[in-house]
Image: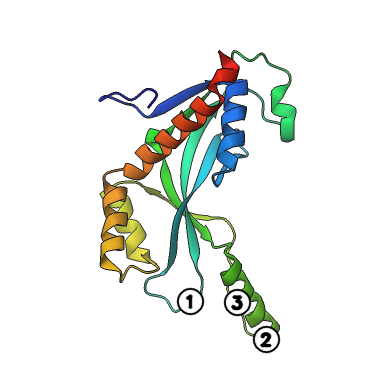
Amino acid sequence: MLKRRKDNDYMLSLKKLEFVSVMAVATNYFRTFVVDSKGQGYIFGDAFKLFTYRNKESDMQFSSYLKIPVDVSFKMMDGLGMLVKEGNDIQATIRFKDTEYVLMESRGLFYNALKELKEKSGEKVETMSGFIGPYSIDQAGLDDLLGEFRVIGEEEEQKFEEFKTKFLTQEVIKNEYKHFCNYQSKVKRHFN
C-alpha cells in the first residue's frame, strides 16, 4: 500500500488533476465531494449502516456517512470548472485523521417507497433534511451516537460488536485511507 508507515498521519496530498481523477474513481464507490459555503471541502463516504432513534417512537431511518475534510487551494466551480484557472501544481490534502461520523435521513429505495405509500394513504410522515452530528470516531463519539440512535440490526450481537470495534479502533478511517490509496494507484500512471 502507498504511504503505509507505523507513524502514519493518514493524510493524502494530491495535485489538482490527480485529485479530480481520484474523485472520479471514488464516485463509483459511493463517495461524494462537497464544498460548503465557507469553501471547506469534504468527502462523504457511505458507511453502510442504518440507524433509527433509540428512545423515540419513529419510523425514520438514517444512513451513516464518513465526513472527511479536504483542504483545497484551488477554486471550486461547477462541473469541470475546477480544471481551469490555476496550474496543476497546487494541492488538495485529504485529512483522514480528522474524519467524523454523520447521519442523514435514508435515501434507500424501500424506505422511500414505504414513506410514499404512507403519505398517499393520508398518514403524517416525518422527514428531515441535513446531517445529524458530527460524531467523533472514538469512545465519546460512539457513546453520543448510541445514546440517541440504535443500529438497525444491533440485536445481531456479533455484527454489532464488529461495528463498535471498527469504530473504536478507527479501522473505518484506516480502511477509507487504504481505499483512496488504491484509487490513487489506479490513476497514478497518468501523472508520472
Amino acid on which the number 1 mark rests in the picture: Ser
Quarter the C terminus occupies: top right
* The one of 184 and 139 positioned closer to us in this rendering: 184
Horizontal side of residue 9 vs 192, given as left or right: left
Mark 2, residues whose alpha carbon is within 10 Å: few (<14), some, or many (≥20)? few
Amino acid on which the number 2 mark rests in the picture: Gly
Amino acid on which the number 3 mark rests in the picture: Leu
Q: Secondary structure at mark 1?
A: loop
Residue farthest along the bottom direction in this orientation: 121
Mark 1, residues whose alpha carbon is within 10 Å: few (<14), some, or many (≥20)? few
- Tell me, yes or no, if residue 117 can be seen here: yes
Task: Give the residue pinned by disc 3.
Answer: 114
Quarter the N terminus occupies: top left
Q: CA distance from mark 1 to mark 3?
A: 14 Å
Mark 2 or mark 1: whose residue is earlier in sequence: 1
Q: Position of residue 18 (x, y in %)?
A: 58, 23
- Tell me, yes or no, if residue 91 can be seen here: no
Q: Going 37% across and 69% down the picture, which residue do you hit?
A: 153
Q: CA distance from mark 2 to mark 1?
A: 17 Å
Task: Give the residue pinned by disc 2.
Answer: 122
Horizontal side of residue 188 vs 101, given as left or right: right
